[in-house]
Amino acid sequence: MRDQGMGRWASRRALIEGDRVALESKSRRVSYAEFDVRTNRVANGLYRQGVRFGDRVAMLLFNSVEFMEVLFGCAKLGAIAVPINFRLASAEVAYLLGDSGAVVFVASGRLFEVAAAAMQVEGVNVRELYLVGDSPAEWSDAVMPFEALLKDAAADPRDEEVNLGDVAMLMYTSGTTGRPKGAMLTHGNMVWNAINMLGRLTGLSHDDRSVTAAPMFHIGGLGVFTLPLFYLGASNYLLETFSPRETLDLMAKERATGMFLVPAMWAAIAQVEDFDSYDLGSLRFGISGGAPCPLTVIEFFQSKGINFLEGFGMTETSPVVSVLAAEDVKSKAGSIGRVCMHVDARIVDEEDRDCETGTVGELLLMGPNIFKGYWGLPAASAEALKNGWFHTGDLGRIDAEGFITLVDRKKDMIITGGENVYPIEVEQVLFRHPGIQDVAVIGVKDERWGETVVAVVVARDADAIDPDEVIFFARERLAHFKAPTRVEVVSELPRNATGKILKRELRVRFAGDASSVSR
């Protein structure tokens, strides 16, 4: 068989245990055998429409069985899937369509207006738009229902040569500091990510089940449980969009054994009033990732007897890099754990020289899960992948036992009066303030100190929070140079779809400058 890519997973699972449920949603339930046939038809339908090896197929889709069908149909053809954030405005979608050079576009029917408007922008060369579900569109040669792509398409597999080093998808980075970049993730990246997950979560098997509530256009929603469980022959329930109560309800009803959510989602679930009425006894792994998880959230789920783990990964790492095992959660609180089996890590200084154990420097990574580079950006790719090592831009340290602790993003570190301040450390202290629900710490220019620490907070209730009291609270628990000198109260913090706080927007609002202070 010439196909060594992700598409082969569907074929092999259909052969080994075709009757097992692969994917389920509110409206569909699909076995591995049915999924294999459907994805053959997607691949053949795309080929009939002129899509060839290496061509890009854009996906503006809610979490759904159809999302996975398009992804695996592209994989079987050797085409490149381009998942797009369904919360973007039409101009932002148009940028991704144009940047990727997508020739076919598959979108959820409810997003037709956004998709149609994006297709009209100059530089977008999409030939056909296929819509999943109900739509206000009038069908034409250019706008068709998704099932038209499969109609009369052969159910037999294509004989395409797809290798592990070929690009499977362009997964666009969050774009917290500017235009998003398309990370080229290969078929091999997906295989090794699945293997890394199997090596870190002892006992995962085809009897496991997850509810995918994090959006699958985000590598965490797709890569932490959804694809690895598919690789194993296990089952995924795909929840169209996240809501705290519905997610919690499905975790209980579907007897989920593993869940991945970003910290903001875990925090929202923790605030469901009747949380204790839901039976989560089947949950063996609760994993938080995508951003640092507040210790208060970790402690809440641990207090409920849940095996709550914190993982670290990035779009460029497919995503899993490390996991903090349950037995280490208390003794190594704040760490992101040890790296997975097939990942190597270093901490280096500004000259890429290895730092001494326990010294803060930039985290570098190497392994078969590391991306191939940024689409159409050779200079950015060369800078990120110097000497075979991926330069993450994260600052951290590794102790003598191999545990990694991240202290912050390199660009977000604050230098005040010559002292380094890592916002994460300050944020974790402020999360313990009884009146603070959410917090972000940024550095702003200061004539005397170079930078000063500013905390942007969301109050827990409607009562006004006293900024001076917050500063006093921090100074009791931190060195004074680390404590905020200014506190700004807002109704909510700006976040992207993966839950990461958009500190760039906060700098614009409170410092008048989008960038961090230049060094």
Image (cartoon, helix red, strand yellow):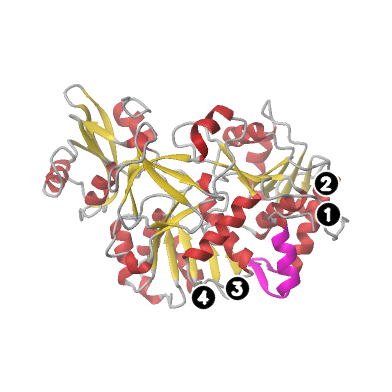
Q: CA distance from mark 3 to mark 1?
A: 27 Å
Q: Which residue is mark 4?
A: 255
Image quarter where the N terminus lies is: bottom right
Q: Residues within 10 Å of mark 4 (few under 14, many from 20)?
A: some
In the image, taking residue 276 as reference, residue 116 lies left or right, namely right
The kind of residue on which mark 4 rests is: Arg
Q: Which mark is residue 85?
A: none
What range of the chain is rendered magenta? 8-32
Q: Which residue is mark 3?
A: 206
Residue at disc 1, secondary structure: loop
Q: Which residue is mark 2?
A: 47
Q: Nearer the viewer, residue 5 or 473?
A: 5
Sequence order check: which comes first, mark 4 or mark 1?
A: 1
Residue 385 in sight from this viewpoint: no
Residue at disc 3, secondary structure: loop
Residue 318 in sight from this viewpoint: yes
Residue 401: x, y in percent?
Answer: 32, 58
Q: Which residue is mark 1?
A: 158
Q: Residue furthest top?
A: 447
Q: Residue at the spot x=51%, y=53% of the render? A: 220
Q: Quadrant of the rendered structure where residue 362 is?
A: top left
Above or below: residue 351 compared with residue 33 = above
Q: Nearer the viewer, mark 3 or mark 2?
A: 3
Residue at disc 2, secondary structure: helix
Sequence order check: which comes first, mark 4 or mark 3?
A: 3
Residue 472: x, y in percent?
Answer: 11, 45
Q: Residue at the spot x=51%, y=75% of the render? A: 255
Cβ–Cβ under 8 Å for marks 2 and 1: yes
Q: Nearer the viewer, mark 4 or mark 3?
A: 3
Q: Residue at the spot x=33%, y=65% of the render? A: 328
Sequence order check: which comes first, mark 2 or mark 4?
A: 2
The kind of residue on which mark 3 rests is: His
